[in-house]
Amino acid sequence: MNIESYHLNFVTEEYDNDGNLKKFGLKYPENFNFGYDIIDKYAELEPNRRALMWVDLKGNEKTFTYGELSRLSNKAANMFLAQGIKKGDHVILVMKRHYQFWYTMMALIKIGAIAIPATYLLTVKDFVYRMDAADVKGVVATHDGEVTEYIDEAEKKTHGELKCKYIVNGERGGWKSFDEEIEKYPDTLERIPTKASEIFLLYFTSGTTGYPKMAIHDHTLALAHIQTAKHWQKVCPDGIHLTVSDSGWAKCAWGKMYGQLAMGTCVFVYDFDKFIPENMLAIMEKYRITTFCAPPTMYRFFINAGLEKYDLSSLKYCNIAGEALSAEVFNRWKEATGLELMEGYGQTESTCLIGNIIGMKPKPGSMGKPTPLYEVDLLDKEGNPVPDGAVGEIVVKGDYEHTAGLFRGYYNNEEATEKVWYDGYYHTGDTAKRDSDGYYWYVGRNDDVIKSSGYRIGPFEVESVLVTHPAVLECAVTGVPHPIRGEVVKATIVLCDGYEPTEELKQEIQTHVKKNTAPYKYPRVVEFVKELPKTISGKIRRVEIRENDRNKENK
């Protein structure tokens, strides 16, 4: 058996007469562990097969085979064990897009420790909260920026005690050099007993309200992402896949870790700080990227950068996720490249729940249909299924103890878990509509839907039209109270360079919306701002815009 077919040991698939995926399921032994049963097995089958290619801003390159990933993860595992990190311990990883992240993750999986990937954008306060909330026992962090300084400050204010602190790509007092220390340990490791049902990963959610919660994942998440990689991203064993995400976000697990490595494709990592579309396009051209995934905003920047200047003929398949896709971006990308953008939907708490999988004809702006691994529906506030065309909350049938690939609840937060797992469903908090063909169309978060004169208006419906106006760089749509209509639509807009926030431009934008969507959706209130309030992960905080509006009203 070779790597191309080995994943079939862990999945069940059924196809229709046209070759399209109809059913997808998981099968796995009780002791499944991605580090041993995928990485080490692939190292045994094809040790010299390319698994990871890393490139940084300076042009430095490194390539790692499955054999090397296996050996390096064993060395890192032995290093952690020597520092007292054991099964069940939490280790926070702030490693940006550094290549060491991949074998560090595999090392923690192998020893049964629990990885907590985190963004390098966190502050001292953020680290204090995370280190206390998760009872962190170890840290591996980048030397870049002020990350290690912030962690040192946070350590003084936390209640727990760290067993180890490793710094990557640099030196700092009180920290051990990851790259130097790892060389002191053997590259063999006796298998440590773990179970597929045990926790191996925690992600802090980037919610738009309150403190972030910790989504708990067991080992089945890794296998569930085979569906993501194989049937949504269409990665292939002889291809090179690039997902843009930093290692601190769950999108890294979606796009550059489990499913991709299980499918035997080469994961491409571009280690950069600031997104510059021309640089990314040049990288895609030079390294002949075959499959690619990024949020719609990046595609918009690519289009504006002039796609005709780059040879992207190696690209075979492109996906988008992270925010809703406008028809404008879909159509312009297709005109320029001939490729359709295949949208998908999921959360930090899940894998790909809804998507335009292989064989589907995408509808621009639609998330697609429920993926075969999950039973997805739309429910009203009373818990009843809604008819086609009506807005409902996206829910997934199952329970948090036995639904493979879905999170197991929120760590140390039973109340928050019970708010989303009840009546046999996981309630996502996102709303959508379903058309007569079964395609789902994103509306917004439950709290973001605007109720005006009896209409329910989703922010994305209006935002997707606003961004087609040449003056609009980005925008957020919210509702503001109105004595007669209940609420009216408000657009908070960041303008492109070269445009001034005039009354004439405001009216022009309002007219543009009226002409391109139902007139009742146009923004009766328009505010021009320098920037939008966002979470650390870049999600727009509409709740903050609403709070600011209420505060202004109450003055």
Image (cartoon, helix red, strand yellow):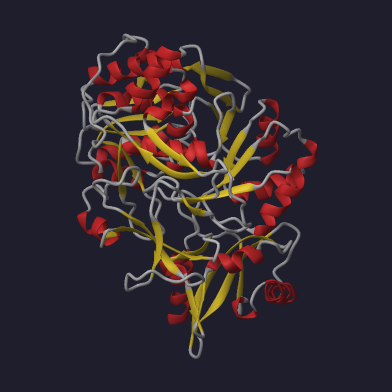
Residue at image location 63% in from the left, 47% down from the top:
341
**Quadrant of the frame with the N terminus:** top left
Q: How many marks?
A: 0
Of 479 and 153, nearer the camera is 479
Residue at image location 37% in from the left, 50% down from the top:
205
Of 210 and 21, nearer the camera is 21
Q: Is residue 107 above or below residue 90?
A: above
Q: Give x and y (percent) for residue 332.
A: 73, 52
Q: Is residue 365 visible?
A: yes
Residue at image location 53% in from the left, 48% down from the top:
321
Q: Residue reaching furthest bottom?
A: 484
Q: Is residue 150 visible?
A: no
Q: Residue reaching furthest front?
A: 17
**Quarter of the image holding residue 466?**
bottom right
Is residue 135 rendered to the left or right of residue 101?
left
Q: Give x and y (percent) for residue 508.
A: 74, 74
**Quadrant of the frame with the C terminus:** bottom left
Q: Give x and y (percent) for residue 500.
A: 73, 66
**Quarter of the image holding residue 474?**
bottom right
Q: Is residue 533 above or below residue 189?
A: below
Q: Is residue 442 above or below residue 181?
A: below
Q: Give x and y (percent) for residue 12.
A: 39, 36
**Quarter of the image holding residue 139?**
top left
Q: Is residue 265 above or below residue 50?
A: below
